[in-house]
Image (cartoon, helix red, strand yellow):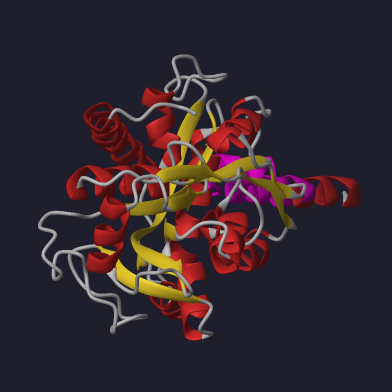
Amino acid sequence: MPQTRISRRHFTLATAAAAGSLALPSFAQGGWPTRPIRVVVPYTPGGFTDQMARLVQAGLQARLGQPVLIDNKPGANSLIGVDAVAKAAPDGSTFGVVIAAYAANTTLYPKLPYDPQKDLTGVSLMGVSPLLAAINVDAPFKNARELIAYARAHPGKVSFGSSGNGSAAHLTTELWKSLTQTYMIHIPYRGAAPALTDLMGGQIQLFFDAPTGLINQAKAGKVRLIGVAGDRRLAAAPEVPTFIEQGFAGFTGSTWAGMIAPAGTPREIVKRMSDEVARIIKSDETRAKLDAMGTIPAGSTPEEFDAFITAETAKWAKVIRTAGVKLE
């Protein structure tokens, strides 16, 4: 009968469709992502964290098929933005990009508005960036040795900026002060961009930061670079010697950028996002951009990033306690 033939045909098509769906990952059945994805950046636009987020933004949009929106929420050394991620629904619609301060805050603050172990999870380490030291072009010193001599002769006369209390820039400069036995005044900012603006304007004289913003301003003659806080020179600024080369043995400091998500986000979504970030980071196009920024590409698994955060937390805890860093 025609009706019987039609029914069998429908049954065959339905069976084939069901079998095909079983071959798809579980998150694909829910169609993730089905709406725009928000990436919270806990700093002002223009700084290293913001640039790293925007570096993967277009690639993620193309690969995931949904708009990826950058949401800058600066303040409190990233606590405001990170807390927004921690309290977001764990449905794959919210992620965050953090830097080294994320690990340092665990020691710096006696009580956080979130629990980094219970409320958040790592997605991928994106890149690691040795810090550069820059000085104002009109400062009464032109290099690291002259800066030390001036700071010793004029205690408290030199001020240095950072992207916030407990940031990699702050902690690295505190180590520098301890190593060189100098006294300089710390001026915290709500992000790297305003600190760099004040460095160029002469309101502060020294600023350690990720190379991305400093290199271009140095090429334009607006700041002077005096050293790399790494174990080798940067391909993007080969003329700038490391501090180790200049006789400051063992002095290094770096920041990094990585993506996090609210705890409870389905593991298959976290892994999918991690895989996509890694593919973008490791592409020839992105690697070239990172090289120009003085950043070493990474692109890790969620498990690797969680282990990295644990190690960073322990490392910064030691630095904070040894240097006696206090929140101002």
| Residue 254 location, quadrant | bottom left
Residue in the image at 53% along x and 50% along y: 273
Q: Is residue 281 at least partly visible in the picture?
A: yes
Instruction: Look at the magenta stretch and give its main secondary structure.
Output: helix
Judging depth in this view, the residue of 279 and 148 nearest the camera is: 148
In this rendering, the answer to whether 186 lies above or below 323 is: below
Image x and y of residue 157, in percent? 42, 50
Image x and y of residue 150, in percent? 30, 60
Image x and y of residue 70, in percent? 69, 53
Residue in the image at 61% along x and 28% along y: 83
Image x and y of residue 321, in percent? 26, 26
Residue in the image at 36% along x and 48% along y: 301
Residue in the image at 65% along x and 58% along y: 64
Q: Is residue 33 at least partly visible in the picture?
A: no
Residue 24 highlighted magenta (yes or no): yes
Residues in magenta, as a range:
10-33
In this rendering, the answer to whether 3 lies above or below 299 is: above
Instruction: Please identify the residue farthest to the front as the structure is shown.
Output: 153
